[in-house]
Amino acid sequence: MVSAIPDRAALVAAARDTIRRGSKSFAAASSLFDRVTRERVWLLYAWCRACDDIVDAQDMGGALGDQSGAAERLALVRRLTAQAMAGQATGNPAFDALGLVARETGLTMAMAEAVIGGFALDAADWQPRTEADLMRYCWHVAGAVGVMMAVVMGVSPDDEDTLDRAADLGLAFQLANIARDLAEDDAAGRCYLPAEWLAEADLPPGEQLKPHHRETLAGLARRLCDMAQAHECSARVGAGRLRPRQRWAILAAAGIYGDIARKVAARGDKAWHSRTVVSAKAKLAWIGRAGWRALRPVPASCHRGAQARRHTRKSLIALAEAKPWG
């Protein structure tokens, strides 16, 4: 029998511990929010982290565990999420955290299902064929999280354009992560580079990390990083519509994660000799820089950069509805 839902203070404390262990970059950026928003962001993050870890049989985003039984683990995530959204105790603090933040902010089951769709793709050992496939995956695993984060910060669910920009921040994060983690994903038997990209570059599937292919792979990584830059620019435009402290936090996060993409691109074929990281000093610098930028109008360069994005939340949702996965 599942016990009662823990009180808010206990759920917030557990979520704070989760984000500190799971994402130092996001934890640093979240410290800039006002207390209530910060706690709600932690609560949502805890659910996202738990879903990812359960489906991938990993701990805090570490090495993938045994992937047998992925369908059953996905079913567990869906069941616990549905219970939490219905206001029922789940016995898992991360899912209880989702239920709490949903009650406080109006998050919906449809929003949560959009995120779970990405975990379903990983559970099915899916890989993208086209760039559009890649971007639809990024929408599920990160863009949809950006939408939920925006609602947590008080953006109206009816503010379509701002939600598009929030999704862009998630898309930028995920593209940077994919570029950074190409070697780790390859070791786990996963590849998020579109098959069409590999074919165009004459890279045999499964051999992209071979030493003699590294220079070609670096070119594809730069392509990912350029796409991330366009979505980062769009997110900066959207951040201009937020309240000052929220704007500061989002601009800091965009800068920190954007640095991951910029560093991967700059490292070229050496990008996967070691994990690309943003130092604590660099994170602090971005926090200071973001505070200054939060006080100023969005620069014209961001508006121009955003025009380079080829996919938006609306277009990706429409594509998914018109052409189901298969």
Image (cartoon, rainbow, N blue to C red):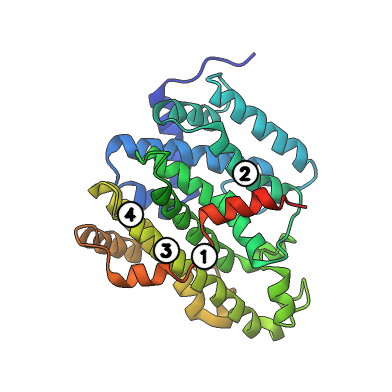
Task: Report crowding for label 2: few under 14, some 14 to 19, many 20 or more residues within 10 A (C-alpha).
Answer: many
Taking the spot 47% from the left edge, 80% from the top edge, the residue there is 266
What amino acid type should be assigned to the residue bearing mark 1? Answer: Ala
Q: Which residue occupies the foreground of this view, 116 or 91?
A: 116
The reply, left or right, for residue 11 in relation to residue 38 is right
Question: Mark 4 belongs to which amino acid?
Answer: Ala
Q: CA distance from mark 2 to mark 3?
A: 26 Å
Q: Nearer the viewer, residue 149 or 59?
A: 149
* Quadrant in the rendering for residue 251: bottom left
Residue at position x 71%, y 64% in the image: 187
Cα distance between the residues tagged 1 and 2 = 20 Å
Alpha carbon distance from label 3 to label 4: 10 Å
Can I make out residue 278 in this image?
no
Please name which of the two marks, 1 or 3, marks the residue nearer to the observer. 3
Q: Count neighbours of disc 3 (C-alpha within 10 A) and say few if under 14, some if 14 to 19, many if 20 or more.
A: many
The residue under label 3 is: 232
Residue in view at x 42 percent, y 66 percent: 258
Task: Determine which quarter of the picture holds residue 48.
Answer: top right
Q: Mark 2 is on which residue type? A: Asp
Q: Given the image, on which type of amino acid does mark 3 rest?
A: Glu
Judging from the image, what secondary structure is the residue with disc 3 in? Answer: helix
Label ID, residue 176: 1
Sequence-first tag of 1 and 3? 1
Q: Which mark is residue 53?
A: 2
Q: Which mark is residue 239?
A: 4
Disc 2 and disc 3 in contact, CB within 8 angstroms: no
Residues 57 and 225: in front is 225
Residue at (56, 21) in percent of width and height: 86
